[in-house]
């Protein structure tokens, strides 16, 4: 009776362990969604059903019904980018592996029939992987940490897409604005070239003067062609990131970039902020922790590599039925697993150095991004407060001098070209500032670079050595 009670208790314990492994309703999406809200303040949807996709399509249509702002473009990309939706499936794969790690191993059944003369023997066996059963409490935490790394990697993909979309949006708007001003330059050059042609026909202009004005017009036409090509390329890049096609590609952008802020950000403790919230640093730390755990698992299982427990029942028509059990394991006579332990230790030390490298690079990247941001702000402010007003003042004075017949029409047209070129340079400086701000925002949370992507792989290698 005591043996039966013990057997029942053991079976109940195993069933309880197996019952703990189940799928979560959100598929592990909540941490990714929370990270998006924390760092971006945007909504995130995982299209896991037709109803989810329909809700996303309705939201996309609402966003496209009006001119896209920068935040609207980011929100649209987070909802509609199919590559991002594909990366969400990594969560489903990772959770399936996590649940699988918590499930009881399937038992095996063996049947055998042999004859010896008139004697017929039938062998029946029931066996289960005892090593996997014993390591079940250890493998599930390891897979849980691996799943956390997957969640961090997917969250990094979300933040990276948001940064890329914001930069593509800025470049597309700046390109369209630049096309408008470049077209004005060409129109002024075209008017100057036409006037020079007419004056040359009546003998009031030399060939040199006419060729000079014609050269200005040819250069302006070339500049316009290049600006239009850049406008098409930047718009198509933004279209790809937004996941738009067909009639959706006719979305409307605002006529100009946002104004320069009154003050630049002051981030005196930018390095500490970056180390506290960068996803690649967190991923490297998780990889080091998981590798350390895997190394301990290797040390605990170095003498038990293949261990199976089986029940045996053999019957024969010539004798009584045999019953019993058997245990099989590998004898460490030639391979004492020292090489596997040494490999795991080497992988662990490699992961530690990778984590240190990630932290050092994070400090440098955020310092560089912040320095670029401040320089871009100063340059854009100098264009806005100094160069453009001076060009405007010069243009006004030249108009007065032209009205007083102190300068000719060609001087006035040349000054108009210079003023428009100054405004175009100011647009480019403003564009560079907003791009620098987007890079700074991304540097504060960390791109999923080589260190973050290699961290799960290094931990998996240590896990392979552990198993």
Image: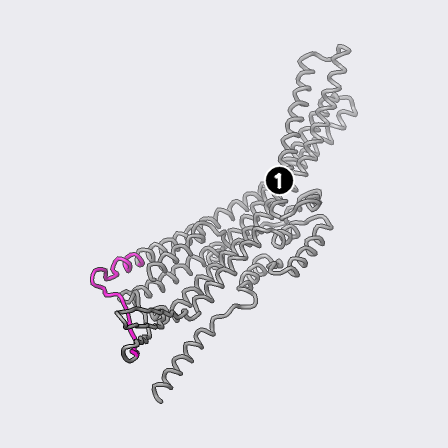
Confirm whether the magenta stretch covers residue 198. no
Residue displayed at 65% across by 47% down: 244
The magenta region covers 321-344
Task: Check disc 1: other Cα within 10 Å, few if <14, some if 14-19, many if 20+.
Answer: many
Residue displayed at 59% across by 59% down: 46
Q: Is residue 280 above or below residue 137?
A: above
Residue furthest out toward the right? 403
Of residues 70 and 460, which is closer to you in this image? 460
Of residues 269 and 106, which is closer to you in this image? 106
Of residues 226 and 271, which is closer to you in this image? 226
- Which colouring convention does the figure follow? one colour
Confirm whether the magenta stretch covers residue 336. yes
Give how far across and how far down residue 48 sits, in percent.
60, 60
Give SS at disc 1: helix
Task: Give the left or right position of residue 292, taking residue 178 as reference.
Answer: left
Which residue is under mark 1? 234
Q: Is residue 33 above or below residue 161?
A: below
């Amino acid at each position: 009776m005591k043996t039966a009670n013990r057997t029942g208790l053991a079976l109940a314990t195993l069933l309880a362990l197996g019952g703990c492994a189940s799928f979560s309703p959100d598929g592990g999406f909540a941490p990714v969604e929370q990270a998006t809200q924390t760092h971006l303040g945007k909504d995130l949807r995982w299209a896991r059903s037709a109803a989810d996709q329909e809700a996303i399509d309705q939201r996309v249509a609402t966003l496209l019904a009006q001119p896209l702002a920068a935040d609207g473009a980011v929100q649209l990309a987070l909802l509609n980018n199919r590559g991002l939706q594909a990366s969400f499936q990594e969560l489903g794969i990772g959770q399936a592996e996590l649940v699988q790690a918590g499930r009881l191993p399937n038992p095996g059944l063996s049947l055998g029939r042999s004859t010896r003369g008139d004697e017929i023997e039938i062998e029946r066996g029931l066996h289960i992987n005892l090593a996997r059963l014993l390591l079940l409490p250890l493998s599930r935490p390891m897979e849980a940490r691996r799943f956390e790394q997957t969640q961090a990697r997917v969250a990094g993909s979300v933040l990276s897409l948001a940064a890329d979309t914001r930069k593509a949006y800025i470049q597309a708007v700046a390109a369209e604005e630049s096309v408008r001003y470049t077209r004005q330059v060409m129109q002024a050059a075209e008017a100057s070239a036409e006037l020079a042609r007419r004056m040359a026909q009546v003998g009031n202009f030399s060939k040199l003067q006419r060729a000079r004005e014609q050269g200005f017009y040819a250069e302006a036409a070339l500049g316009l062609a290049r600006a239009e090509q850049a406008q098409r390329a930047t718009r198509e890049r933004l279209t790809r990131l937004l996941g738009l096609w067909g009639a959706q590609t006719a979305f409307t952008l605002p006529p100009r970039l946002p104004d320069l802020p009154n003050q630049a950000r002051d981030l005196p403790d930018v390095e500490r902020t970056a180390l506290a919230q960068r996803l690649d640093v967190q991923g490297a730390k998780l990889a080091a922790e998981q590798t350390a755990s895997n190394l301990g698992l290797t040390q605990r299982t170095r003498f038990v590599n293949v261990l199976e427990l089986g029940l045996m029942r053999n019957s024969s028509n010539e004798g009584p039925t045999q019953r019993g059990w058997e245990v099989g394991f590998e004898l460490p006579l030639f391979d004492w697993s020292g090489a596997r332990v040494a490999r795991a230790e080497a992988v662990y030390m490699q992961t530690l150095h990778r984590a240190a490298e990630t932290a050092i690079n994070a400090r440098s990247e955020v310092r560089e991004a912040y320095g670029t941001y401040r320089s871009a702000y100063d340059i854009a402010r100098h264009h806005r407060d100094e160069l453009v007003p001076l060009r405007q003042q010069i243009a006004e004075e030249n108009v007065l001098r032209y009205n007083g017949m102190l300068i000719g029409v060609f001087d006035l047209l040349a000054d108009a070209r210079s003023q428009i070129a100054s405004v175009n340079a100011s647009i480019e400086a403003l564009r560079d500032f907003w791009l620098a701000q987007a890079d700074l925002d991304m540097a504060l949370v960390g791109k999923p670079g080589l260190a973050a992507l290699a961290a799960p792989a290094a931990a998996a290698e240590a896990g392979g050595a552990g198993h």
